[in-house]
Image (cartoon, rainbow, N blue to C red):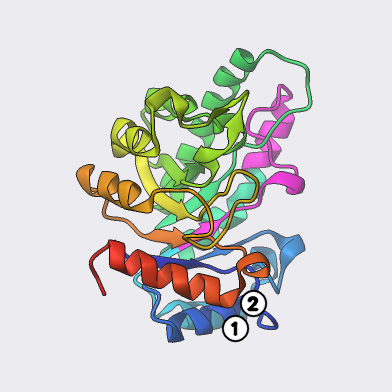
Amino acid sequence: MLIGYMAWSLEGPDVLGQLEWAAEQNFGAVAFHTTPTLAPERAIDPGALGDAELVRLQTALKPFESIEIHAPFGPYDVSLVSPNPWIRLASVETLRESVELAGAIKARVVTVHTGHTLAAVPRETLRPLLLESLQLLEELAKEHNVTVGVETADALGRAEDLAIIEEAKLAHVGVTLDIGHLCFQIEGRPAYAAFGSLAGVIERFGPLIRNIHLHDYDGTHDHLALGEGNIDFAAVIGALRRVDYDGPVCLEINVERSGVEGFLRSRDRLAELLGES
């Protein structure tokens, strides 16, 4: 398993500068956001990439064996579960630029969020709406020969919700498993509770996992450096090995909270767990 760096915020560099730093720090994989409102410090804006800028990006990505794109989400008005079909269609179109860029740079996976809806509808009503959106994403991903990983968040906040990806049976759509998110408390229980542990979730849904986001969680704060929270990462890595996961493990650390040294400590700890040090 390759150790990945999620570009988010170093003191000063834009995303291209962060990619250069990640290469210098010997990360084998890299991920970056494509939300235009966060560019250029925290994201790449696909719509602003001319030919020269695309070449610069491709050059910056050459040192890495694996690339992930994190598509727009949250406040960028992406909802794959809205009861309004036009909002769902518009959301898939919003994701199109990220998928097209992924095809152009040969990214391994595009991570997306389902988003939320403010409509007062029963939770079970969202299931067929999400299935329709996933089918549209499947067609888009197939067109550009990429894989989409739906992150464990929002409508997939509970581990048992991942069964909908299993039900969809789509060749180009799987799961981006965010280990920290699976520890969030939902109605008084951790999101992984239905399967007993994080390892239980991994073993249940192993064939669906296309990507891993790794960060610690202390019960209040997430995106912490490894060791700053309560997660048993040895158990997580052990479970990933048991399901033969061979993709990257992307460290998604909040640099503003844990510092650059937190990223580096996390890289070194993860290398120990993977037996690479």
Tell me, yes or no, whether the two marked residues, 1 and 2, touch with CB atoms within 8 Å.
yes
The amino acid on which the numbered mark 1 sits, given as a three-letter code, is Gly
Q: Is residue 124 left or right of residue 277?
A: right
Quarter holding the C terminus is bottom left
Q: Is residue 21 visible?
A: yes
Residue 137 position, x and y percent, is 51, 39
Q: Is residue 226 left or right of residue 51?
A: left
Name the residue that disc number 2 marks. 10
Q: Earlier in the sequence, mark 1 or mark 2?
A: 2
When the figure is inspected, residue 19 is found, relative to residue 247, above or below; the finding is below
Viewer-closest of 212 and 105 = 212
- Label 1 to label 2, Cα distance in Å? 9 Å
Determine which quarter of the picture holds residue 186.
top right
Circle 2: is it few (<14), some (14-19), or many (20+) Cα within 10 Å? some
Name which residue lies at 56% across and 56% down. 70
Name which residue lies at 60% across and 43% down. 219
When the figure is inspected, residue 96 is found, relative to residue 114, above or below; the finding is below
Residue 64 position, x and y percent, is 39, 75
Name the residue that disc number 1 marks. 17
Q: Is residue 105 visible?
A: no
Give the magenta range.
68-92
Q: Is residue 105 left or right of residue 126?
A: left
- Element type at mark 2: loop
Total count of labels: 2
